[in-house]
Image: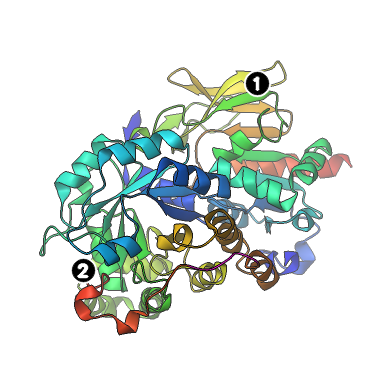
Amino acid sequence: MRDEATFSVKAGLAEMLKGGVIMDVVTPDQAMVAEAAGAAAVMALERVPADIRRDGGVARMSDPEIIAAITEAVTIPVMAKARIGHFMEARVLEALEVDYIDESEVLTPADEANHIDKWAFKVPFVCGATNLGEAVRRIGEGAAMIRSKGEAGTGDIVEAVRHMREITGAIRRLAGLSSDELPTAAKELQAPLELVRSIARDGRLPVVLFCAGGIATPADAALMMALGAEGVFVGSGIFKSEDPPARARAIVEATTHWQDAERVAQASRALGGAMASLESSKLEHEQLLAQRGW
Amino acid sequence: MAAADRQPSTPAGEQGRTALVGVLALQGDFEAHARVLGRLGARVVAVRVPADLDGVQALVLPGGESTTMTLGVEREGLAEPLRALARDGVPLLGSCAGLIMLDSEHLGLMDMRADRNAFGRQIRSFEADIEMDELPGGPIRGIFIRAPQIAEHGPEVRILATVEGHAVAARQGDMLVVSFHSELTGDDRLHVWLLQRAAERRARR
């Protein structure tokens, strides 16, 4: 008996990515640099978030040609982004056999009311969240992996820290509630009760939790691991920096050795300049990507 | 760091009787393996640097990305210490990427060559009940995530299970490898095997 696309199979790939770094790449060459630096997976894109922010306009799924070329170039898993609610972009990505689809707020949302019904797909999905309710709603829709949203393309870690603390703090609070308090907690979280019960019982999400949005340095990656992330996404932080291969290797090393400050210090040396950054708190409301999705 | 990572799951007085098991923790699902081993009463140490291998009586090479792990093993200088451990007869269990790590093109500890992603990309990942030789208690539920196969092997390697013509489990002496993940299904029989081999080895010494 062979069962494909079960939730265990979908969530299982995220289990294998744990302790790893998933890097945004826009060319096959960058994908090979990421792989050689120790990336656990790559996110195939047309533009990294910093460029999406700079260029403006509608940000869509990448050209399948780019995704296919990146898929050819590496043996590690390849992820790609679809717009929130754009199930047809997701179908295209599934047809391209990407390994994971990121229903991402970094792209311009296609549906302002509904996220993609992720149960309807064989390929697993990762979704962003700013708090526990949002994370659990995405899992209820079939997401097999959750990441913090952070504020992509800024190089400012403050939003990722806020989101990770929101999620892990709310899980700790749930774990302290009695069973007759959980229905009200579920109502307040606007999340399915059964999932809320399982999270309260286990003290953790039923899927892997990564961090994304604003990681620019090895210390940023180690900070997020210390705050409860099980791995990190780095978007613009690597290929918008001065020395991408060195920074990529250093962030991989810091993610593995986050408990050892001497190793993080050693990894952080002589990396050249970090990406050009933006302070999240100085952005106009409509420039904030994390407020997309609900 | 090694000391901080050691998490005895049994009272200190029992440490003489329970095995100290290393789980390679550079990347991947090492925590899932550690949880199974902890439930079985083993003391577990996360292995990230050679010093973490001190006193280890059994070792797990977990699932994850074999490329990432290979680079990590190089960066940390872990290849020789891992080979020395195997030469010493410390029993090893490798799952998925761990199987690849033990083949002739990586650590070279088993006389076999693995093919990565033998079943295809993630969309063709699956779970199934596997009939496995030498494993008491009936079929084992395995989750196959972009799983490898054993493409070629020498006479020392015994193939224990196949799926659709792909060899997915094998043993060479006290080294057991599987293409799949039973650590994610709650089936602890492979870990029981590992602890038994470690206990037998200690009894012999």
- The stretch drawn in magenta includes residue A255: no
Establish whether labels 1 and 2 are both on one chain: no
Place residue A172 in its image quadrant: bottom left
Identify whether A119 is placed above or below A240: above
Q: Amino acid at mark 2?
A: Arg
Q: Secondary structure at mark 1?
A: strand
Query: What residue is shown at x 38% (from left), y 67% (from top)?
Result: A213
Image quarter (top left, top right, bottom left or bottom right) of the N terminus of chain A:
top left
Residue assigned mark 1: B158
The magenta span reads: A270-274
Crowdedness near tag 2: few (<14), some (14–19) or many (≥20) residues, C-alpha within 10 Å: some
Q: Is residue A197 left or right of residue B133?
A: left
Q: x, y (%) of residue A256?
A: 60, 60
The kind of secondary structure the magenta stretch mainly shows is: loop
- Tell me the tag on residue A292: 2
Query: What residue is shown at x 82% (from left), y 36% (from top)?
Result: B87
Image quarter (top left, top right, bottom left or bottom right) of the C terminus of chain A:
bottom left
Q: x, y (%) of residue A290?
A: 27, 71
Place residue A156 in its image quadrant: bottom left
Crowdedness near tag 1: few (<14), some (14–19) or many (≥20) residues, C-alpha within 10 Å: some
Q: Foreground: B121 or A140?
A: B121
Q: x, y (%) of residue A58?
A: 17, 59
Identify whether A167 is placed above or below A207: below
Q: Amino acid at mark 1?
A: Arg
